[in-house]
Image (spheres, helix red, strand yellow):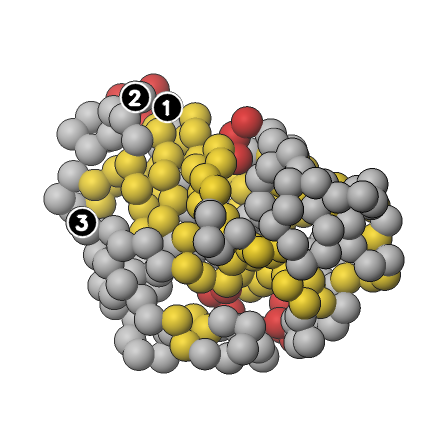
């Protein structure tokens, strides 16, 4: 893909849900909390000198969450499913991404079902650098898994059942596809189950009961693409 975004995002909501349910309540107190952040708390230097500016808003639509005790993400269990009522959240607001009950254990892989469309708003730096493409306060949609990514038929993503996910949309006309993104403590092992563009690093296993914070950092990651598209060119993702 022209944009090697390896995104990893969680379901953002203040809910206590029972394992495998989309209920708004649970008789059991949450034993797992995953928070979200728009910053990695590290100085991020973009690879492309032409990048300028950062998003003030990053919105993703979430469909579900699965976990696996295996580094290769095999035998994953869906623990949260809102595919019938997906929800969109702004990751820059530092939300609670998941608060629910999971079976106690050590999970070496976390899988998110999300839309492949990212909505974002550029800051003043991006607008000043790319005045014909980016405007402050305007929301843009970037399709990360597109039909026109130009990498050939081998650059296809799949779901946890091994079924290929067709890529739709273009940079000019984004189309939302439901994709899966896998975070593992062993990205090489996870890449045997998923395309490497779907895999990100999990800094340490998710131990339940416990908590962790997922970040999506696009600092200095905005650019423009011909003809006059404001795009997210680079970002880093992970847990802290």
Q: Are marks 3 and 2 in contact (CB under 8 Å)?
A: no
Above or below residue 219? Residue 28 is: below
- Residues at circles 1 and 2 in contact by the CB criterion of under 8 Å: yes
Q: Which of disc 3 and disc 1 is earlier in sequence?
A: 1
Q: Tell me the quarter of the picture where residue 129 sits.
A: top left
> Residue 11, position in %: x, y?
58, 45
- Which element type, helix, strand or loop, lies under badge 2? loop
Q: Nearer the viewer, mark 1 or mark 3?
A: 3
Residue that badge 1 annotates: 123
x, y percent for residue 153: 30, 79
Viewer can see residue 18: yes
Residue 180: mark in rendering? none
Packing grade of label 2 (10 A; few <14, some 14-19, many >=20) is: some
At 86% across and 49% down in the image, what residue appears? 209
Structural crowding at the residue carrying mark 3, measured as other residues with C-alpha within 10 Å and reported as few (<14), some (14–19) or many (≥20):
some
Q: Residue at x 62, y 72 (%)?
A: 190
- Give the secondary structure at mark 3: loop
Q: Mark 3 highlights which residue? A: 172
Return the x and y of residue 176 as percentages of the image width and height: 32, 54
Q: Secondary structure at mark 1?
A: loop
Q: Which residue is mark 2?
A: 136
Residue shown at the point (64%, 63%) measured from the top left = 78
């Amino acid at each position: 893909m022209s944009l090697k975004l390896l995104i990893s995002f969680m379901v953002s909501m203040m809910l206590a849900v029972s394992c495998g349910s989309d209920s708004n309540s649970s008789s059991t107190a949450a034993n797992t909390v995953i928070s979200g952040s728009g910053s990695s708390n590290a100085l991020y230097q973009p690879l492309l000198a032409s990048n300028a500016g950062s998003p003030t808003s990053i919105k993703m639509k979430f469909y579900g969450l699965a976990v696996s005790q295996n580094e290769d993400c095999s035998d994953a269990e869906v623990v949260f499913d809102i595919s019938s009522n997906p929800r969109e959240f702004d990751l820059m607001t530092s939300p609670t991404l998941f608060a629910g009950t999971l079976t106690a254990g050590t999970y070496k892989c976390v899988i998110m079902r999300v839309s492949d469309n990212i909505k974002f708003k550029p800051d003043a730096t991006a607008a000043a650098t790319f005045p014909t493409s980016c405007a402050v306060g305007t929301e843009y949609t970037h399709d990360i898994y597109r039909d026109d990514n130009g990498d050939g038929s081998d650059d296809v993503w799949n779901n946890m059942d091994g079924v290929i996910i067709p890529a739709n949309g273009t940079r000019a006309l984004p189309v939302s596809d439901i994709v899966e993104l896998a975070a593992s403590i062993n990205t090489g092992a996870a890449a045997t189950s998923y395309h490497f563009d779907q895999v990100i690093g999990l800094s340490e296993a998710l131990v339940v009961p416990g908590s962790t914070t997922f970040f999506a950092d696009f600092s200095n990651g905005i650019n423009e693409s011909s003809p006059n598209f404001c795009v997210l060119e680079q970002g880093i993702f992970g847990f802290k």
